[in-house]
């Protein structure tokens, strides 16, 4: 796969921050989709900035990231919303109770 990416034989690649490693080289890639953006450090985000000049990048996260949200809301960064849950996804059930050592054990 790494060889195919470097040779330009891959149009779209989907993965985690592993795609930003030094040994992953892209040639003529159309779209890079990276999940778990909340795990990115500053160096990863800087690498994405460099990549974005040549490749369309979609960075995804289910975890709210204040800086990313602010950049999106101010129009500095584009935002895409996935508004439908995966098929057969169970509803989230939240319970609020007084603190109990039994519940957190």
Image (tube, rainbow, N blue to C red):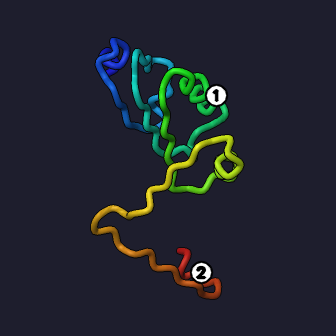
Tell me the number on the disc at residue 61.
none
List x then y, in percent, for residue 81: 49, 55
> What's the residue at 40%, 26% (across, down)?
30
Q: Between residues 15 and 9, which one lies in front from this camera angle?
A: 9
Marks 2 and 1: which is nearer the front?
A: 1
Residue that sits furthest to the bottom in the current view: 98
For the residues bearing labels 2 and 1, Cβ distance under 8 angstroms: no
Closer to the chain start, of discs 2 and 1, is 1
> What's the residue at 58%, 39% (across, down)?
40
Quarter the N terminus occupies = top left
Residue 18 in the image: above or below residue 79:
above
Label 2 and label 1: CA atoms lie apart by 42 Å
List x then y, in percent, for residue 33: 43, 37
Tell me if mark 1 has few (under 14), some (14-19) or many (20+) residues whose alpha carbon lies within 10 angstroms of its own.
few
Q: Which residue is mark 2?
A: 101
Q: Which residue is mark 1?
A: 46
């Amino acid at each position: 796969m790494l060889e195919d990416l470097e040779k330009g034989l891959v149009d779209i690649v989907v993965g985690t921050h592993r795609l930003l490693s030094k040994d992953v080289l892209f040639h003529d890639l159309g779209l890079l989709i990276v999940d778990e953006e909340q795990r990115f450090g500053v160096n990863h985000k800087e690498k994405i900035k460099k990549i974005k000049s040549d490749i369309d990048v979609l960075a995804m996260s289910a975890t709210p990231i204040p800086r990313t949200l602010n950049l999106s809301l101010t129009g500095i960064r584009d935002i895409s919303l996935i508004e439908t849950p995966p098929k057969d996804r169970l509803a989230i059930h939240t319970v609020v109770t007084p603190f109990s050592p039994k519940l957190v054990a």
